[in-house]
Image: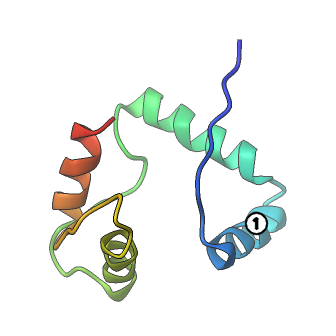
Amino acid sequence: MTNVVQVRLDNKLKKEAETVLHQLGLDLPTAIRIFLTKVTQTHSIPFALTLSNTNTEDADIISSYNNDERFGPFNSVEAMMTHMKKNK
């Protein structure tokens, strides 16, 4: 049995990700399945999430969530992750 998962993405982010994934020989659904497989195997996010030295990219991500009334506001990645864990 399979399920459909819908995710809202910024057009620019989706296109840029698809470009990189295409170069790796992957499509977006396959990359998402790989990510979720790693999450279940490791019981963690398969890349480092740090609170110190929030970089510009992290700040931009937090800002995009803060600007979406369904989320935030968050002043740190930790606050955003706590919110996301509570609202699974």
User: Mark 1 sits on what residue?
Assistant: 18
Determine which quarter of the picture holds residue 5: top right
Residue at horizontal 59%, vertical 51%? Answer: 7
The residue carrying pointer 1 sits among few (fewer than 14), some (14 to 19) or many (20 or more) residues within 10 Å by Cα, namely some
Q: Quadrant of the N terminus?
A: top right
Determine which quarter of the picture holds residue 43: top left
In the rendered image of this protein, does residue 56 appear above or below residue 80?
below
Give how far across and how far down residue 24 sits, in percent.
78, 61
Amino acid type of the residue tagged 1 in the rendering: Glu
Give the color scheme: rainbow, by chain, secondary structure or one colour: rainbow
In the rendered image of this protein, does residue 53 appear above or below residue 69?
below
Residue at horizontal 84%, vertical 56%? Answer: 25
Give how far across and how far down residue 19 sits, in percent.
78, 72
Q: Nearer the viewer, residue 61 or 37?
A: 61
Tell me the SS state at disc 1.
helix
Side (left or right) of 24 relative to 65:
right
Give how far across and how far down residue 63 sits, in percent.
33, 79
Give how far across and how far down residue 9 sits, in percent.
60, 64
Residue at horizontal 74%, vertical 43%? Answer: 30
Side (left or right) of 3 relative to 56:
right
